[in-house]
Each structure stands twice: as C-alpha cells, then as structure tokens.
Image: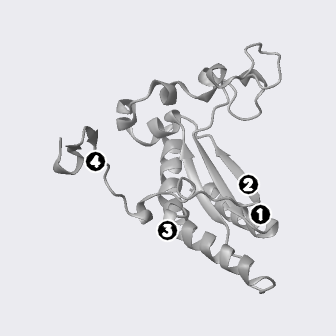
Amino acid sequence: MSEKHQLQGGAPREPVLPMNDIQGIAVPGFLKPQQTLIGIQAAGTPDAIAAFKRFVGAFGNEIATAAETLADRRRHRAAASAKGADAAPAPPLAAIAFTYSGLRKLTPGAVNLPGDAFREGLAARSAYLGDPSNPSDEGNPAQWKVGAPGNELDALIIVAGDEPGLVDERALAISKLLGEA
C-alpha cells in the first residue's frame, strides 16, 4: 500500500481530493429546481466513437466542479437570507455520467473497472432496486423510455439551474456542441 493509503487503526486512510477534481453533482450536489437531461448514444463505428471522444474533450471544461457548485450554493443561501435582494440568476450547472458501455467506447481500460453491477448496467440490475419483474408492468426496464434493453445510453448530461430559460439555453448550447463533435 502506498504511504497515502496505509492503515490507521484498522481502516484505510482516504486520500484528500481537491474540490476542483470532483464533479459538483456528486459533492455537494446540484439541488436545483430546474433540470434538463441529455442522453448520448454513440454508435460503435470508429467515426462515431471519435466524435464521442471529441465531444467529451470539448465538454470537460463545461462540467461544474464541487468548488463551483459549493460557491453557487453559498451565493443562493446569501441571496435568500438577504430577502428581496435582486441578484442576477446564476448560470446553470452541468455534469456528465457515463455507463460502462460508454466508458468502453472511450477507453479500452474500462474493461478493468471493478463492479459487476456497473458492468451489467441498470436494466439488468433493476429488480434488485425493486422494479417490477413482469415486462408488461410499468417500471420494468422493457417499459423504460431511456435505458431499456437495446436502448442504453453511453452518457447522460445533467443541466441544472434556477431559471428554466437559462437551463434550456445551456442545454441547447451543449446539444450544439455535441452535434459539432
């Protein structure tokens, strides 16, 4: 074990991660009233995978960090406690999540990721979450509009904000960036 992860009192020491290296949707979380989701399915062709990689590279700077999200939350709380202060609405926050199939398209190293549940995917594991097992029942993966077997996503982008119009504008800009990749 590296020095950073040596056991102390029987438990591994967790590394301290800089808040600029964590997506804000994970910590502290977006907690925004307006959200738009953009699903990405990249075909398995070399050209489609190259475009997917270009998009991820271009989108990387659009992702809200934990530090940015915490600052946004603090601004929101300060404005709420000032009651009636006319603060300009904050720009929407964005995040991205990948499925196992999406990561495999981006990097061959994804095959070494641990976690059977992640590799199997949400549809295969939905019964463990209490979803109905009968394919005709609402809530069964066969009825899902997104993520149904054969219709899985490679990535999901979350755009969240306080104002619906600003969220829509940001989602449209991200969609255009996706189309340009």
Does the residue at mark 1 contact the one at mark 3 (Cβ under 8 Å)?
no
Identify the residue under disc 3.
67
What residue appears at the point 70 percent right and 27 percent down from the top-left corner? 148
Q: Position of residue 9 (x, y in %)?
A: 24, 42
Does the residue at mark 1 contact the one at mark 2 (Cβ under 8 Å)?
yes
Residue type highlighted by circle 2: Thr
- Secondary structure beneath label 3: helix
Sequence-wise, the earlier of marks 4 and 1 is 4
Residue type highlighted by circle 1: Asp
Identify the residue under disc 2.
36
Sequence-wise, the earlier of marks 1 and 2 is 2
Does the residue at mark 4 contact the one at mark 1 (Cβ under 8 Å)?
no
Q: Is residue 131 above or below residue 20?
A: above
Please name which of the two marks, 2 or 4, marks the residue nearer to the observer. Answer: 4
Label 1, label 3: how far apart the Cα atoms are: 23 Å
Residue type highlighted by circle 4: Arg
Most foreground residue, 1 or 65: 1
Identify the residue under disc 4.
13
Please name which of the two marks, 4 or 1, marks the residue nearer to the observer. Answer: 4
Sequence-wise, the earlier of marks 2 and 4 is 4
What residue appears at the point 38 percent right and 33 percent down from the top-left corner? 113
Among the 4 quarters of the image, the one containing residue 147: top right
- Secondary structure beneath label 4: loop
Label 2, label 4: how far apart the Cα atoms are: 37 Å
- Secondary structure beneath label 1: helix
Please name which of the two marks, 1 or 3, marks the residue nearer to the observer. Answer: 3
Residue type highlighted by circle 3: Ala
Identify the residue under disc 1.
168
What residue appears at the point 51 percent right and 33 percent down from the top-left corner? 101
**Position of residue 73 in the picture relative to residue 111 (left or right):** right
Sequence-wise, the earlier of marks 1 and 3 is 3
**Position of residue 20 in the picture relative to residue 130 (left or right):** left
